[in-house]
Amino acid sequence: MKKLNINIEISEYDNISELLLEDINLIETAKDASERSYSPYSEFSVGAAVLLENGIVVDGNNQENAAYPSGLCAERVALFYANSKYPEISVKTIAIVVKQNNKFKKTPLPPCGSCRQALMETEMRFKTPIKVIMAGEDKVQIIHSISDLLPLSFTSDFLKTD
Ligand code: THU
């Protein structure tokens, strides 16, 4: 028996001004998107903004439904729209924010498991790491590849026959 350890690198910032301008702008776009969230059930308004390799930004927000599981997270709304509209363009970065009780949350929001899986598919598809910016008001965390947020992930490689 042997034990394996997995290390992931998280860049943590106490002040948004330390970030690249490109990342600051993406967070602002995610914030704007969160304002248009349809989340009457959770009252948890998530905004996501995806920066594509060609500089185009696509945003999205969580869309809820009275039949709860029919709703979709902000990250996948933005990502799927980006992939459907620009199927040839790789995804460089995604920024995620949350607004609750009329204020942006202090702590960063890590994407849910299903969103990580969807982001992983896109990262593998374009063979380009996706940077994930989780932006809280008091702290911003950046992961430099979605694979760091989904170790031992299930990918299309496993569908191949031995
Ligand atoms: N949600 C997101 O949009 N992204 C996440 O990463 C976590 C959760 C949404 C789903 C639901 O509309 C609300 O937040 C509460 O879970």
Image (spheres, helix red, strand yellow):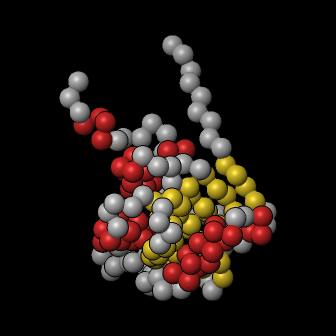
Q: Is residue 24 left or right of residue 62?
A: right
Q: What residue lies at 42% left-to-right and 58% top-to-bottom?
A: 90
Residue nearest the viewer, comparing 75 with 91: 91
In the image, is 16 to the left or to the right of 158?
right
Q: Could you tell me if residue 113 is visible in this image?
A: no
Q: Quadrant of residue 3?
A: top right
Q: Position of residue 16 (x, y in %)?
A: 74, 68
58 and 47: which one is in front?
58
Residue 64 as seen in the image, left or right of residue 47: left
Residue sitting nearer the eye, 3 or 18: 18
User: Residue at the spot x=58%, y=33% of the render?
Assistant: 6
The C terminus lies in which quarter of the figure? top left
State the image coordinates of residue 105 (x, y, percent, origin top left): 66, 73
Regarding residue 100, the answer to whether it shows in the image is yes
Residue at the image point whose x is 54% and y is 16% from the top: 2
- Residue at point 38%, 78% (across, down): 64
Q: Is residue 125 above or below residue 134?
A: above
Q: In the figure, 113 relative to 104: above or below? A: above
| Residue 78 coordinates in the image, percent (x, y) | 42, 71
Looking at this rendering, what residue extends furthest in the top direction?
1
